[in-house]
Amino acid sequence: MLGLFKDTPVIGKANTIIHTPSEKLFNFIGNDLLINYPRWSPEVKELEKLTDGPIKLGTQCRQVRIDQGNRSESTFKVKFFDIGERICFEGVSNPYRCDYVIESVNALDSRITFIFELLSLDLHVRPFEKLVRIAVQDGTERTVKNIKKLIEAD
């Protein structure tokens, strides 16, 4: 019975090869986050930076999303900002993590791995955990496809 209320993260993971150098991919996701995040994730309806300066470790942003008709607002911060390799956002107001890992395959191609973690589920959502897992996995795959499509078209 003790395991009944244990929080198990819901994790989605997807990766692909993108025909662009890793520096350009990192700039697209990291440095140009405010411009491009709503492009690769059209559920983002509002996005604002709450801290001064360029996107970097510790930067905080607020977003408003409409996911499957449900409006949510959250604040997140940049937890990792490893230039050319990784950018990770972690929810401040909600328990989630978005991690983008970039690897250079060769001079012209990169591999992106996107991992989304929903670190806990509200009690009223737990009976639907299997559906949430499917939606999270679908979302990670769609995110990777959208990033690939956008950056290769630029």
Image (cartoon, grey):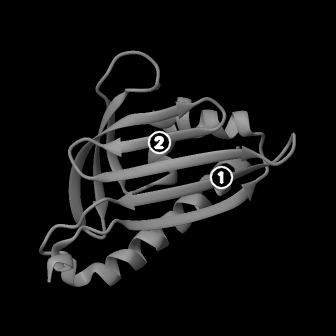
Task: Determine the image quadrant of residue 120.
Answer: bottom left
Q: Which mark is residue 88?
A: 2
Q: Residue at x 41, y 79 (%)?
A: 134
From this view, report whether residue 138 is shown above or below residue 20. below
Q: Nearer the viewer, residue 2 or 50?
A: 2
Q: Which residue sits furthest right?
A: 107
Q: Is residue 63 left or right of residue 151?
A: left
Which residue has dot 1 on it? 112
Quadrant (top left/top right/bottom left/bottom right) for the N terminus: bottom left
Of pointers 1 and 2, the one earlier in the residue sequence:
2
Task: Determine the image quadrant of residue 123.
Answer: bottom left
Q: Secondary structure at mark 2?
A: strand
In percent of width and height, residue 20 lies at: 77, 44
Q: Residue at x 78, y 40 (%)?
A: 21
Q: CA distance from mark 1 to mark 2?
A: 13 Å
Amino acid type at circle 1 is Ile
Q: Is residue 136 left or right of residue 72?
A: right
Task: Determine the image quadrant of residue 82.
Answer: top right
Q: Nearer the viewer, residue 141 or 119?
A: 119
The 10 Å Cα crowd at callout 1, few under 14, some 14 to 19, many 20 or more, is many
Q: Is residue 79 left or right of residue 114?
A: left
The 10 Å Cα crowd at callout 2, few under 14, some 14 to 19, many 20 or more, is many
In percent of width and height, residue 139 lies at: 46, 67
Q: Is residue 86 left or right of residue 94?
A: right
Disc 1 vs disc 2: Cβ atoms closer than 8 Å?
no
From this view, report whether residue 4 is shown above or below residue 102. below
Amino acid type at circle 2 is Cys
Q: Secondary structure at mark 1?
A: strand
Q: Residue at x 24, y 67 (%)?
A: 7
Q: Which residue sits furthest front?
A: 2
From this view, report whether residue 140 is shown above or below residue 104. below
